[in-house]
Image: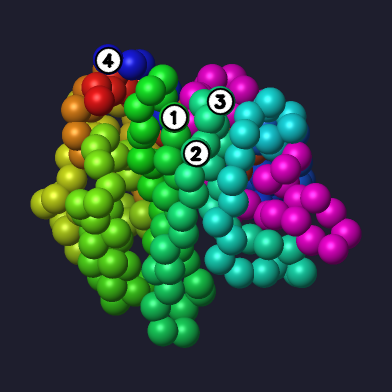
Amino acid sequence: MTTLRVATYNIHRCRGLDGRTSASRIADVIRAIEPDVIALQEVIGASPSSAGHAEELGALLGMGWVMAPTRHLRHALFGNVVLSRLPIIHHAQYDLSWKTCEPRCCQRVDIQVGANTLHLYNVHLGTAFLERRYQAGRLSAVVHDRRIGEPKIVLGDFNEWMKGLATQMLSERLKSIDLRKHLRRRRTYPGMFPVVHLDHIYYEGKVEVTKLELPRTRLALMASDHLPLVAELKVSF
């Protein structure tokens, strides 16, 4: 059995609630929560004029990283990123885009844990109801590809604050971390005065949740419009 700290964090292009863009501030938030693996959403990648925030965060934190871009934002790549202190041995990207809505994806990162492999899925679903309905079905099929063994961790920004269709569909086939059992304050969005929780963690396989944290430091409250959600897990292979 291995203990891992995993987290999900929508970093809002490193733009804080004070209007200031700072990758180093986001890095400070991540450093303080000490994750082994963290899934990020809304990350700016490389452009013709800049290495981007993904590379900068990896360098500041001394973590390996891989990006799954969904579109361009002002000539820069934009999408999901996974940062890991453990070796990343495989990476895949699945299209979740629906009709004319903003492109979305599911990022799968296979992480080496000793002699074993943990499959982590980083997700950022859409804001429209019908869009999420399609994405939930697509995501469920991706995660339940039986060629990919357990354990599996599915986490990210699901853009659902109530038990909507996506949440119901995923909960039928995956185990959901119940924030109510671990946290008095469960709201992750918006950062300074959180009123809803859009960020979730699901899992499949031999996974035990030992602790859940929602850091509400002054720095975390200002750095992004979301708060990071951190889970300490005991994983058996």
Residue 112: numbered disc: 1
Which quadrant: the N terminus?
top left
Residue 205 seen in this snapshot: yes
Instruction: Tell me whether circle 2 and circle 4 mark residues in contact (CB < 8 Å).
Output: no
Earlier sequence position, callout 1 versus callout 4: 4
- Closer to the camera in the image, 87 or 131: 87
What kind of element bears circle 1? strand
Q: Is residue 222 left or right of residue 38?
A: right
Instruction: Tell me whether circle 1 and circle 2 mark residues in contact (CB < 8 Å).
Output: yes
Earlier sequence position, callout 1 versus callout 3: 3
Residue position for label 3: 85
Instruction: Tell me whether circle 1 and circle 3 mark residues in contact (CB < 8 Å).
Output: no
Residue position for label 4: 1
Marks 2 and 3, how far apart in space?
Answer: 12 Å
**Callout 1 amino acid:** Gln
Marks 3 and 4, how far apart in space?
Answer: 18 Å
Of the two numbered discs 2 and 3 in the rendering, the one whose residue sits closer to the viewer: 2
What residue span does the magenta drawing correspond to?
A: 28-56
Residue 235 is situated, as x and y percent measured from the top left of the image, at 28, 23
Residue 191 seen in this snapshot: no
Q: Residue at x 24, y 22 (%)?
A: 236
Instruction: Tell me whether circle 3 and circle 4 mark residues in contact (CB < 8 Å).
Output: no
* The image quarter in which residue 194 lies: top left
Of the two numbered discs 2 and 4 in the rendering, the one whose residue sits closer to the viewer: 2
Number of disc labels: 4
Tell me if residue 70 comes above or below residue 86 in the rendering: below
Marks 2 and 4, how far apart in space?
Answer: 20 Å
